[in-house]
Amino acid sequence: MNTLTEKIIGAAIEVHRVLGPGLLESSYEKCLAHELHLRGIQCIRQQKQPIIYKGLEIDEGYRLDIFVEGQIILELKAVDKLTDLHLAQLLTYLKHSGCTVGYLMNFNEKLFKDGLRRVVLNHT
């Protein structure tokens, strides 16, 4: 998985380098998905995910910004600063999807590395 995450981060850095901060989240999402495809990485934008609540299945409980290779969730933001609420959102997505790794990516930073956060959830 390390090679895949390196490729994902490299693609995100390239998008940020070309576009810079200040655009809408949807612009970064489309461009990052395109960059991932150019690099031979499978991904799905706005992947619908159901949630189960006491036996009730809600078909569209939430949507993943970008779901990479069926194993990594990318939650994109274009905000002044990442907050605990953004982290909680990604943790909830990881919990309900069964995935263990996700990335919060804030494209509204001058340096992309300042808006990148890796999140790992232990499902034990």
Image (tube, rainbow, N blue to C red):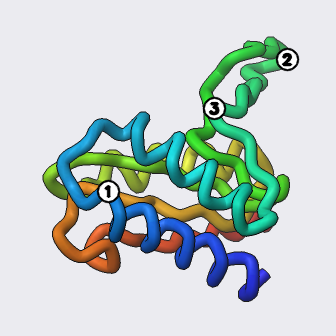
Residue 62 figure quarter: top right
Task: Mark 1 vs mark 3: give the one in front.
Answer: 1
* Residue depicted at x 73% and y 41%: 44
Q: Residues within 10 Å of mark 3 (few under 14, many from 20)?
A: few
The secondary element bearing badge 3 is classed as strand
* Residue depicted at x 40% and y 39%: 27
The secondary element bearing badge 1 is classed as helix
Task: Mark 3 vs mark 2: give the one in front.
Answer: 3
Which residue was labeled with disc 2?
Answer: 55
* Quarter that holds the C terminus: bottom right
Q: Which amino acid is tagged 3?
A: Gln
Residue 82 against residue 8 in the figure, above or below? above
**Which numbered disc flags the more N-terminal residue, 1 or 3?**
1
How far is disc 2 from disc 1 in space, using C-alphas?
44 Å
* Residue depicted at x 54% and y 78%: 10
* Residue depicted at x 30% and y 37%: 24
How far is disc 1 from disc 3 in space, using C-alphas?
21 Å
Q: Which mark is residue 19?
A: 1
Percent from the top left, x then y, of residue 29?
Answer: 50, 44
